[in-house]
Image: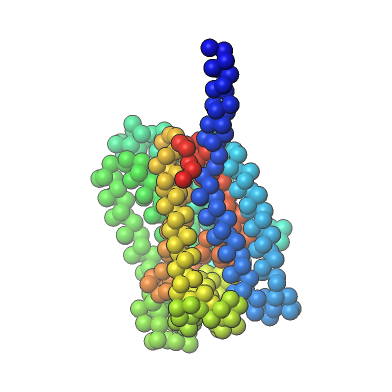
Amino acid sequence: MARQKAERLPQQAADARERNLPDLPFLLLTILLTAIGVVMMYSASYPRAFVEENGNGMYFFIRQLIFAVVGVGAMIVVSYLNYQYWRRMSVWVLAGAVLLLVIVLFMKPVNGARRWIPIFGVTVQPSEIAKLGVVLTFSAMLAYKRERLRSFRTGLLPFILIVIVVVGLLALEPHLSAIIIIGLTAFILMYLGEVPGKWLLLLAGAALVFVAVYLALRGYANDRITAWLDPYADPQNKGYQILQSLYAIGSGGLFGLGFGKSRQKYLYLPEEHNDYVFAIVCEELGFVGAALIVLLFALLVIRGYWIAMHAPDRFGKLVAAGQTTLLALQVLLNIGVVTNVLPATGNSLPFFSYGGTALMLQLAEMGIMLNISKNGVNNLL
């Protein structure tokens, strides 16, 4: 018996190590998309950096590369932190995000919006932290309140109050894309958390009223819808950006002009290294290259939901599903805007758009996903 027990110990240790591995497909897809994103951001940003940074065409690239390396390090560190830690920290993350959303309203406007707080030479976007805060807090509350969700006062009201505060502050910036993404993610989490259908219908109706009022009060939003419906009606002003984006996509053809050979990035297309970087991807890599990148995002999203399905508990399932939904919505919204399928909302493309703090936070969030996968069932293909 002792001998048999001793023989089983190495196999048990190997099984334990296998169970504690992160989800390798998810990890590899994340690193691959980050690497491609940094390279494409370099190509898209070089002309503007050369003009705006006194001939330093590498300015945006070097900063983004540093943030990517730090972000991957943060992802690895967070992947070793038990995800249950975020259950306790969820309220504090949300409270910190709300505080930053208040502070940002006192910042100097950039292009008519207050969305960034400068700290030690970098800019922090509170809406990115708010996305994480809402996912963590909603997941913790839904996991804890499972038996009390049928009551309006104890089940629905706390969620409504959180959404009102966060969305209200975002509306003051204004930041429509963040409102849409946080609103939809919160709704999907509540659906997955088994909130009764009658409350979900009530929330959906309230959301439609809010969007209608928001569009009526915000003149720039109506301009964007007009430009979306007919960009040629005002090609030198309201429709200029989307037309330049479509020119970039169209000129790329099937296989693209080649890496680094975009023409629209030479200050024709505004925000070419940020919200509209995917248009440069299409121009340089063509339909085939852009389709492959979309496929990588699709695989990452599918794997994210796979991790959610195999998470060890309700909180882990909701966090993984919420994070994956955030990623999917941001990708769909950005590509939809760049291709003029959707009106412009000012949403960046994860892992690709320039923005150091956003990239680091996105990679840290992937670390949470990896830790959930460590604690789930065998995650290897």
Q: How many marks?
A: 0
Task: Judge whether residue 156 can be spotted in this image.
Answer: no
Residue at 33% from the left image edge and 37% from the top image edge? 149
Q: Examine the rendered structure and indicate whether residue 126 appears above or below residue 346.
A: above
Q: Nearer the viewer, residue 6 or 268?
A: 6
- Which percent across, then down, holds residue 32? 56, 58
Residue at 53% from the left image edge and 81% from the top image edge? 257
Residue closest to the far top: 1
Q: As drawn, is 73 to the left or to the right of 111? A: right
- Which percent across, then down, holds residue 113? 54, 67
Task: Judge whether residue 290 can be spotted in this image.
Answer: yes
Q: Nearer the viewer, residue 373 or 59?
A: 373
Residue at 45% from the left image edge and 78% from the top image edge? 254
Q: As drawn, is 137 to the left or to the right of 154? A: right
The chosen color scheme is rainbow
Q: Nearer the viewer, residue 39 or 152?
A: 39
Q: Examine the rendered structure and indicate whether residue 328 appears above or below residue 75.
A: below
Q: Quadrant of residue 58?
A: bottom right
- Which percent across, then down, holds residue 13? 57, 28
Residue at 40% from the left image edge and 75% from the top image edge? 340
Q: Quadrant of residue 242?
A: bottom left
Q: Quadrant of residue 59?
A: bottom right
Q: Nearer the viewer, residue 25 or 216?
A: 25
